[in-house]
Amino acid sequence: MTNVLIVEDEDQIADFIARGLKGEGWTTTRAASGEQALDLLADNIFDVVLLDIMLPGMSGHDVCARMRLKKNYTPVLMLTALDETDDKVAGLKKGADDYLPKPFDFDELIARIAALVRREADYHAPKGPQTEDDIRFDADALCLVVSGERVELSSKERDFMAMLIKNAGRVLSRERILNAVWGLNEDPMTNTVDVYVRRLREKLGPHSDRIATVRGIGYRYM
Ligand code: CA
């Protein structure tokens, strides 16, 4: 389950975000200051940190810099009322992974968090010993390695493939795939998922049957 640390001093905003994330089935923990956030980060594992920049005492930038100094690489999404390029650059330099200006659209927030969680899952997926029929991600080159051959993927193909691999053996419905990879704004009647399955199967070559069709529901990766 996705566990999000919300670092925000304003109760109203923190409550609003927490309610929305709970609605997505995610767990949230709240810190009202940078110091409190660092304490929580020292003892707990979070999937994503939502970090407000304007905090009393230590700023969001400082919190992020401290995290990275302590080799804590939990993805950080910076939230700020200051919609300025300088601020964004400063945040990214301090090790933030993404940046969202307030006020933000809730769907946008959900999509950004989901993207960070996915990216993290791809990079840290156990690679295991390499075998002849191995299909794995090369995290550095951001490509798929199929039987030792590098296969380039578009970003959506990569997200989709990562989701399949992560859920190997499980049936994934078209709706679930669509929501996770393309976001909530995609037309649910679209055949995008099927189109991408066709593309991925082509790229998997002799291993194309690893993506099995589950009639009337969706797909299963094996
Ligand atoms: Ca604030």
Image (cartoon, helix red, strand yellow):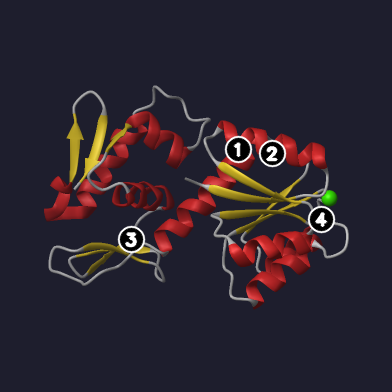
Q: Residue 152 carries which label?
A: 3
Q: Is residue 217 above or below residue 9?
A: above
Badge 2 density bin: few <14, some 14–19, many ≥20, Cα 10 Å: some
Q: Do the residues labelled 2 and 1 touch (CB within 8 Å)?
A: yes
Q: How far apart are marks 4 and 3 (CA)?
A: 35 Å
Amino acid type for the residue under numbered disc 1: Leu
Q: How far apart are marks 2 and 1 (CA)?
A: 6 Å
Element type where label 2 sits in the image? helix
Q: How far apart are marks 3 and 2 (CA)?
A: 36 Å
Residue 39 location, quadrant: bottom right
55 to the left or right of 162: right
Q: How far apart are marks 1 and 4 (CA)?
A: 26 Å
Viewer-proximal residue, 44 or 168? 44
Q: Do the residues labelled 3 and 2 touch (CB within 8 Å)?
A: no
Of the two numbered discs 4 and 3 on the same chain, state the one appearing first in sequence: 4
Of the two numbered discs 1 and 4 on the same chain, state the one appearing first in sequence: 1
Question: To which residue does mark 2 refer?
Answer: 17
Q: Where is residue 44 in the image (x, y as percent from the top left)?
A: 58, 60
Badge 1 density bin: few <14, some 14–19, many ≥20, Cα 10 Å: many
Of the two numbered discs 3 and 1 on the same chain, state the one appearing first in sequence: 1
Badge 3 density bin: few <14, some 14–19, many ≥20, Cα 10 Å: some
Question: To which residue does mark 4 refer?
Answer: 84
Residue at x 17%, y 66% (from the top left corner): 147
Residue 58 location, quadrant: bottom right
Residue at x 87%, y 63% (from the top left corner): 57
Question: To which residue does mark 1 refer?
Answer: 21
Residue at x 27%, y 45% (from the top left corner): 199
Q: Do the residues labelled 1 and 4 touch (CB within 8 Å)?
A: no
